Amino acid sequence: MLILVTYDVSVITSDGRRRLRNIAKTCLDYGIRVQNSVFECEVDPAQFVVLKSTLLDIYNSEEDSLRFYMLGKHGKQKVDHFGAKPVDDPLRDPLII
């Protein structure tokens, strides 16, 4: 299923900058960055539980926010992209070496 993960992390302190890096690294383990703080993640239900739990352990509920949008099994078909920075989809686009 396709999950959209968005976040807003306070970077005023060094702890905030660390949380921002850790959240981005975790999201990269599960998906691709489509905007600065937005990731598309193709995961199964078990992977989503782990991803969500990991991110909730990293973020600070007093200063940061996390949002998870469940777009479902056919979520890619519901996305229209316009403008700069097209995103390569390694699952859909052919890999040329």
Image: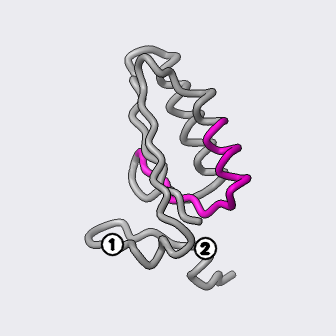
Figure quadrant of the N terminus: bottom right
- Name the element at disc 2: loop
Residue at left 65%, top 60%? Answer: 43
User: Could you tell me how many numbered marks the image carries?
Assistant: 2
Judging by the rendered image, the residue that carries numbered circle 1 is 81
- Name the element at disc 1: loop
| Residue 44 on the magenta span | yes
Residue 97 or residue 16, whichever sits in front = 16
Figure quadrant of the C terminus: bottom right
> Disc 1 and disc 2: Cα gap in Å?
16 Å
Residue at left 50%, top 31%? Answer: 20
Q: Characterize the local packing of mark 2: few (<14), some (14-19) or many (20 or more) Cα atoms within 10 angstroms.
A: few
Residue at left 48%, top 25%? Answer: 17
Point out residue 82 in the picture as x, y percentages from the top left corner. Answer: 27, 72
Q: Characterize the local packing of mark 1: few (<14), some (14-19) or many (20 or more) Cα atoms within 10 angstroms.
A: few
From the image, state whether disc 1 or disc 2 is nearer to you. 1
Residue 3 or residue 36, whichever sits in front = 3
| Residue lying at the far left of the rendered structure | 83
**Vertical relation: 29 (above or below) 9:** below
**Vertical relation: 5 (above or below) 70:** above
| Residue lying at the far right of the rendered structure | 46
Point out residue 90 in the picture as x, y percentages from the top left corner. Answer: 60, 73
- Amino acid carrying label 1: it is His
Q: Which residues are magenta?
A: 37-53
- Amino acid carrying label 2: it is Pro
Q: Say which mark, if any, is on residue 90.
A: 2
Identify the mark nearer the N-term, 1 or 2.
1
